[in-house]
Structure formats: structure tokens, C-alpha cells
Image (cartoon, rainbow, N blue to C red):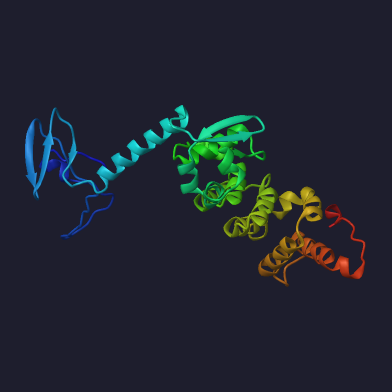
């Protein structure tokens, strides 16, 4: 509870039930702030000065100096990126160019570091060609590396950012994208997310998609898209889905769509060896 304690009366809290006898209640203060006017207090060797009714915590704020230093550093990095201060590398996309700093890129990615360390064309020309990202997505990548990206831009560009994180071995960005993609799985994107999880070896995202489809029974919601997905999906991915179906399927339960998917996947797995011609599963007939 966030409440002022100005007098003894403020220490009373109403309760919903009646109690008899005496109770001892431990109260933990996550923060305790004082609000005197123009006074200096000495609390446990900590000097607390307040002016004009400003509230000040009686406990020292661990990491406060470090936090201020971090904010200052981020402002400086943002200015370096936005104004191109002493930029020494050009990033070319199909839609335009951006300026950046070799030191920042190298510190963030071992792939970039290798480009500038060895005698590669990027070192000689101080130019990096990124043809598989739009200019805006590439700018979002730089904003992430410089610590200045906002939540909206991250969500907007997280799929291309995931591809860049995988390509340039930016582990923390890859983890952040995976966690973000886990947050809004739905029937419209679950198959796409599952394919992305397989492509980039995202274990948690793959498990999340499997759980959504099979444990929660949402496989029914994507029955119109499932045939096309299986035609294009990697066979090892289908085997993973097969294992997931075996995990959640109960043999004594009535026929379900999960069983049909299981049969379909079995046909897809054995078809190359036995020469079967696999037909689409007609879900409407079940």
C-alpha cells in the first residue's frame, strides 16, 4: 500500500473480519520516504536533505549512480547514431544507407567483429551490404545495438530483427525476439511462428507453438491451413509434431483432429520410402 503516515492515526488499517485477542503483524517497508520542510536528517549515518516538501527515501538507492551513468551513456550513443558523430562505417540496404561505428558493431556481434578484423572487403571499403533487410528494419537493428530502440519499433520489426540476430550471431537480440514472439501466439500466426522457430532453432518458441496447437486443442482453428503447412514444412519438424501428438493424445479418447494430423504425418514420413501418393486430408468428412 502506498500511503502517507503523518500521525499515529495513519498507522491504523481497517480489516474485513473481526479478530479477538492480540496479534503481532510484521510489516515490511519496501521504501520509506520522509517529507519534512527544509531539514537535514541523520538516519543510520545517511544524510537526507529535503526542500520544499520533496519526498526523499531514507535508504540509499543501490545502483542509482550506475543508473544515471547508464542513462547518460545511452544519450551519448543515441547522439552518435542520430548525428553520425565520428561514424566510420556505411551500411547499405536496397532502400538507402545508414552510418554507424565499427566499435559498436564489433562489440555487439562476433560476425561484424570478424568483418573488420580480417582482410575482408568490409574492412577495406568500410561498407557493409545488408540486402535482406529494409532500411527501417536495419535502423531498428542499429537502435537495438546502440541501446535506443523503443518497444513499438522492436515489436514492429522483430521478425527481421530475429533474422539479423541469427545471421550476425547477436545472442541477446535473438533471445529477446524469441521471448517477444512467445507473448502473442494466436491462430493466425502460430504456424508461421512454428516455422520460424524451426528455422532459427528457437526451442522455447517451438514448444510454445506445440503447446498452443495440441495441449490447448487449437489445431482445430488452423485446419484450413494445415495441409499447405505440411506440404512446405521440413520433415524433421513434422516428426517433432508427431512426438507432440503422441504426448498429448490419449488412446481411449474419441477420434479427434489430432489423430487425423498424426495419420497424415505418418503418411508424409513414409511416403518417400514406400512410394505412396499422399492425398490431402479432408477434415470436413470427419
Residue 243 x %, y %: 70, 68
Query: Which quarter shows the C terminus?
Result: bottom right
Q: Is residue 232 above or below residue 80?
A: below
Q: Is residue 214 above or below residue 152?
A: below
Compared across the picture, whether 244 is left or right of 274 comes to left
What is the count of numbered marks?
A: 0
Q: Is residue 202 visible?
A: yes
Name the residue nearer the viewer: 56 or 84: 84
Residue 78 x %, y %: 42, 33
Determine which quarter of the picture holds residue 92: top right
Q: Is residue 1 visible?
A: no
Q: Going 49% across and 41% down the picture, which residue do you hit?
A: 102
Name the residue nearer the viewer: 8 or 32: 32
Determine which quarter of the picture holds residue 53: top left
Name the residue nearer the viewer: 39 or 7: 39
Q: Going 55% across and 38% down the picture, which residue do you hit?
A: 126
Compared across the picture, whether 81 is left or right of 207 comes to left
Residue 146 x %, y %: 45, 39
Q: Is residue 90 above or below residue 166?
A: above
Name the residue nearer the viewer: 207 or 18: 207
Query: Which quarter shows the N terminus?
Result: top left
Residue 28 x %, y %: 22, 53
Amino acid at each position: 500500500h502506498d500511503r502517507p503516515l503523518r500521525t499515529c492515526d495513519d498507522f491504523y488499517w481497517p480489516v474485513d473480519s473481526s479478530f479477538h485477542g492480540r496479534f503481532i503483524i510484521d510489516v515490511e517497508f519496501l521504501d520509506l520516504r520522509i517529507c519534512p520542510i527544509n531539514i537535514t536528517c541523520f538516519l543510520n549515518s545517511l544524510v537526507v536533505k529535503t526542500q520544499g516538501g520533496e519526498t526523499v527515501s531514507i535508504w540509499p538507492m543501490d545502483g542509482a549512480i550506475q543508473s544515471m551513468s547508464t542513462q547518460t551513456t545511452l544519450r551519448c550513443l543515441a547522439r552518435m547514431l542520430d548525428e553520425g558523430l565520428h561514424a566510420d562505417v556505411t551500411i547499405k540496404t536496397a532502400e538507402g544507407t545508414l552510418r554507424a561505428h565499427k566499435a559498436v558493431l564489433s562489440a555487439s556481434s562476433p560476425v561484424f567483429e570478424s568483418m573488420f578484423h580480417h582482410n575482408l572487403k568490409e574492412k577495406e571499403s568500410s561498407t557493409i551490404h545488408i540486402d535482406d533487410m529494409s532500411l527501417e528494419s536495419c535502423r531498428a537493428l542499429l537502435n537495438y545495438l546502440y541501446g535506443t530502440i523503443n518497444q513499438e519499433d522492436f515489436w514492429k520489426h522483430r521478425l527481421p530483427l530475429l533474422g539479423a540476430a541469427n545471421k550476425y550471431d547477436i545472442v541477446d537480440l535473438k533471445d529477446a525476439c524469441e521471448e517477444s514472439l512467445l507473448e502473442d501466439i494466436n491462430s493466425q500466426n502460430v504456424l508461421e511462428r512454428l516455422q520460424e522457430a524451426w528455422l532459427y532453432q528457437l526451442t522455447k518458441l517451438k514448444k510454445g507453438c506445440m503447446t498452443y496447437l495440441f495441449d490447448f486443442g487449437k489445431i482445430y482453428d488452423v485446419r484450413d491451413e494445415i495441409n499447405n503447412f505440411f506440404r512446405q514444412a521440413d520433415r524433421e519438424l513434422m516428426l517433432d509434431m508427431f512426438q507432440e501428438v503422441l504426448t498429448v493424445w490419449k488412446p481411449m479418447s474419441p477420434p479427434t483432429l489430432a489423430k487425423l494430423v498424426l495419420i497424415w504425418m505418418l503418411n508424409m514420413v513414409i511416403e518417400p520410402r514406400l512410394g505412396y501418393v499422399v492425398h490431402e486430408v479432408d477434415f470436413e468428412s470427419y
